[in-house]
Amino acid sequence: MTLAELLEKIEEKHPNFEAVSNLMAHLSLGNMSPDTLIDLAHSLNEATAKNLRYLVDKSLSVGKIEKQVNTEKHWNALRPKLANDDLSEEFFEALHCLFDSVRQMRNRHGDITHGHLGPKKYTDEKTARFLFDISLAHARYVLVVADMIDSEQISYDKYEDFNAELDLQGESIGQIPYSKLVYDHDYNRYIDELERFNPDVYKE
């Protein structure tokens, strides 16, 4: 199964992985500069961390995960889920040290200069390709792990008061209320709104 096919399969179960698909779409753009490869490697690492964390930790909403900009904290929480008899937690700890180097390279040399004054040093092409290939292989492993996780969505019918409140924000289509449209087509937003309405939703 190709990486694209694996990602398509996972998106059917976990729509939040669309963000990873959007990143992977850049691979079809053809030749990329070393700096673009470094930038993409960093973004891929961050996107897979956040999306897998969302699957395994139901106490965190999308909004909370997005606010946690330290990707290493996500990987710290995910290591037990990623590790197995062949790949230890120490292996992933070392791997993520490498990803931290990628992040630092991105900040120093990437196409996005983060406010640094030029001239900037450009990343060596072989180094960039090496780090990008590692990030790609790691992303594939994360997707395999994600494919083994069953999606556990909150039932739409469980929070009638919230649904009625959300219905006031938009119009229904035919017999389908606005809250159901949000639930079916933008589940992440539905959960964010629900958490604002009921901060104790994950404690129930």
Image: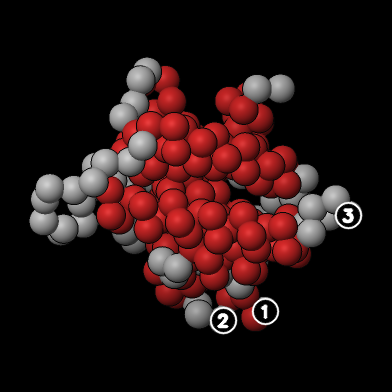
Q: Can residue 149 be seen at all in this image of the molecule?
A: yes
Amino acid identity at mark 3: Asp
Q: Which image quadrant is residue 124 in? A: top left
Q: Characterize the local packing of mark 3: few (<14), some (14-19) or many (20 or more) Cα atoms within 10 angstroms.
A: few
Measured from the top left, where is residue 155 in percent x and y? 65, 58
Element under disc 1? loop
Measured from the top left, where is residue 26 in percent x and y? 39, 28
The residue labelled by disc 2 is 200
Q: Characterize the local packing of mark 1: few (<14), some (14-19) or many (20 or more) Cα atoms within 10 angstroms.
A: few
The residue labelled by disc 3 is 85
Q: Which image quadrant is residue 165 in? A: bottom left
Amino acid identity at mark 2: Asp
Q: Characterize the local packing of mark 2: few (<14), some (14-19) or many (20 or more) Cα atoms within 10 angstroms.
A: few
Measured from the top left, where is residue 149 in percent x and y? 74, 50
Work out which quarter of the rendered image holds the N terminus and state it: top right
- Does the CB distance between marks 1 and 3 fall below 8 Å? no
Measured from the top left, where is residue 18 in percent x and y? 49, 39
Q: Which mark is residue 204?
A: 1
Amino acid identity at mark 1: Glu
Gap between marks 2 and 1, in whole Å?
Answer: 7 Å
Element under disc 2? loop
Gap between marks 3 and 2, in whole Å?
Answer: 37 Å
Which residue shows up at 68% across the image and 42% down it? 141
Which residue shows up at 64% across the image and 60% down it? 94
- Does the CB distance between marks 2 and 1 fall below 8 Å? yes
Q: In this picture, is 52 found above or below 200?
A: above
Q: Judge by depth and name the residue closer to the eye, 200 or 158.
A: 200
Q: Judge by depth and name the residue closer to the eye, 172 or 135.
A: 135
Which is nearer the N-term, disc 1 or disc 3? 3
Which is nearer the N-term, disc 3 or disc 2? 3
Gap between marks 1 and 3, in whole Å?
Answer: 35 Å
Which residue shows up at 43% across the image and 25% down it? 27
